[in-house]
Amino acid sequence: MSAKSFFAAIGIVALLTGFGPAQAQSEGPSERRVTGPPVGIVPAPGQAPAEPSDAPPNPFSTEHELKSIQARPGLNDGGVTVGTLGAVDLSNVNPSTTVDNPMPDNLWQGTNRARVIALMQQIPTRTMSIAMNDLKRRLLLSNVNPPQGKSPGKSLLLVRTSQLYQAGNLEDVVSLTDGIPRTVTDEDLLKYRVDALLLLGRNDPACETADRVRLVAESPYWGKVGAFCQVHKGNPSAAGLTVDFLREKEGDDKFFFTVMDRALGYLDKLPDNLLADDALDIAMLRAVEADPVNHIDPLNMTPPFLAAFANAPTGTFEQRLVLGEMAAQIGAINSRQLERLYALYPFETKDLANAKTDWSSKSPSVGQALLYQAAGATQNVEQRIELLSTSWHLGEQQGIFPITARVMERYAKQIEPDIVLAWAAGGFLKSSLTVGDSERAFAWYELVDVRSARAGVTNTQAVQLLKPDLWIAKPTERLPWRKRDVEELHQIAWAVEQKTLGTVRKFQQKLRMLEALGYRVPETVLSDKGRAAFEDVSPPPQSLAYLVRASDEGKMGESALLALITLGAEGPGAATTTTMTEVIRSLSYVGLIQDARALALEASLAPVSAPSERAGE
């Protein structure tokens, strides 16, 4: 596949993927109800989904009940009494690594296991919301007491593992499944572990896990993994026998048999039109030293594939940068991993010296890598600020500003807020807010206030309109909540509205979210004559009513899952104001105030969307 066609297809993929504080907790249920009856898109609380009476038992269910074996007479007087055999309970299996800011032990209190499993399967598998990805990961990986009740077929561990794998969190899949007892042979569960290990290039532990299942498994997948492992271990004769046996049963798998023929020396070259579909295919291509990127349909760039390719020595540097940025957008890799990709690009010294002008002649991904390396190479403060500002601006154009801000955080933090740098405060303020460094954000904002007071500067309106974001990020005495400040900012928003459509709508959205966090917004602002022009016209998601009910009942974990379902794959930036305020209020109400603020801030910092018609016209 040529580089030109690769990136054209990648563009198609990007289009398809879209790539206080206490007041809210004191509200009563009657004050927070959504009007109208809820629509039954999910099982009602406390109820498991109905199962057909003739459904066959699941042999791999962690809740499968074995019948008692009747006692039979033995050689002694009383005989030998044989009791009930218990199934292995995998609900207590937890990851081998810990997560930051883990969930409390009472996460699932009030919600039974069947409902948790049903909701967990509905949360978006991929989203470009960093706050949502963080909340989802902590829900899936925190070491907490499991919900009570029985599993409706699928085990909770299987659903957790599936969600992590589909999101591209391969290391987390391995961590979560490390504690599975060796006696467990659940094919579906262990396939996720094997696939994650194969994509990470850890063939030895993948083959060790496969050996547990291969002799008792029903799926032909395990026979194919066995053949691959025999090749990996240097036993081609055994692999050939396995392949011959599989060919009689699974002869239509062209990819597997073609690559195995290459591995066994029966084929000199792989055909160009051979396309990989799963993790085993990728591992087999690597085994025969074929570049997997050349055998992937760009429209099949799933999160696990993106995670595998982003940091693997495959493809061109430019392809790796594109895939790395896509993987970072959806949380399949973190910003530190993307940093390493940027740092590896082979620029020359002259490239770094001319980065200020030459970045624009390169593709956006290569341009970002150039700006990253140049910012780290220069010791001149003003030059670094120019490079940072250019990178942030390019990130906004690419639609990846949150990722860009995190990648550039290392160099941005080396520049201390100073009154002589007040001219650059806007970029540093937004970047600091985006990465969650509220203290530095406060410090940069204070420079704007001081500069304006001393020099009578009037061109700081855009920075001043970020003041509500400081209130959203964190309550502090450094920036008290005052009615007159809100009213003044409202006037500034209307002044900016003449140049930037949607400014007042965005300001109204910020105020609504602040109100949901417990701040008292002045009635003079809420009753503005143009407010009606900014009201939501789209109906709320059907799951919103269930979210409100769950939070009213104090169900923390259920509320968190429903919040993710309600926001959907598009995340806070695309949610209506009504949806965002209810999500914020509900999460705050059950004690997840930090998550509520993170989601609110993400929505508040999202680009301004122009309304269909301007207020007052």
Image: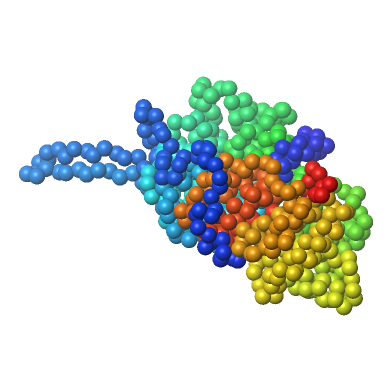
Up the image or down, 115 lies above or below 504; here it is above
505 or 240, which lies in front? 505
Residue 600, image x, y percentages:
66, 57
Residue visible at 63% across and 53% down in the picture: 581
In the image, what residue occupies the spot 56% across and 36% down?
228
Percent across and percent down for residue 138 are: 55, 55
Outermost residue to the bottom: 454
Q: Is residue 346 in view?
A: no
Q: Is residue 342 above or below residue 249?
A: below
Q: Nearer the viewer, residue 252 or 509?
A: 509
Across the whole image, how many numbered discs are drawn on residues?
Answer: 0
Q: The N terminus lies in which quarter of the figure? A: top right
Task: Identify the residue at horizontal 22%, vertical 38% (top origin).
Answer: 69
- Horizontal side of 195 relative to 44 (left or right) equals right
Q: How is the image coloured?
A: rainbow
| Spot occupied by residue 292 in the image (x, y as percentages of width and height) | 69, 38
Q: Position of residue 483 (x, y in %)?
A: 71, 68
Q: Residue furthest left?
A: 77
Residue occupying the point 57% across, 49% down? 563
Q: Quadrant of residue 434?
A: bottom right
Q: Is residue 495 visible?
A: yes
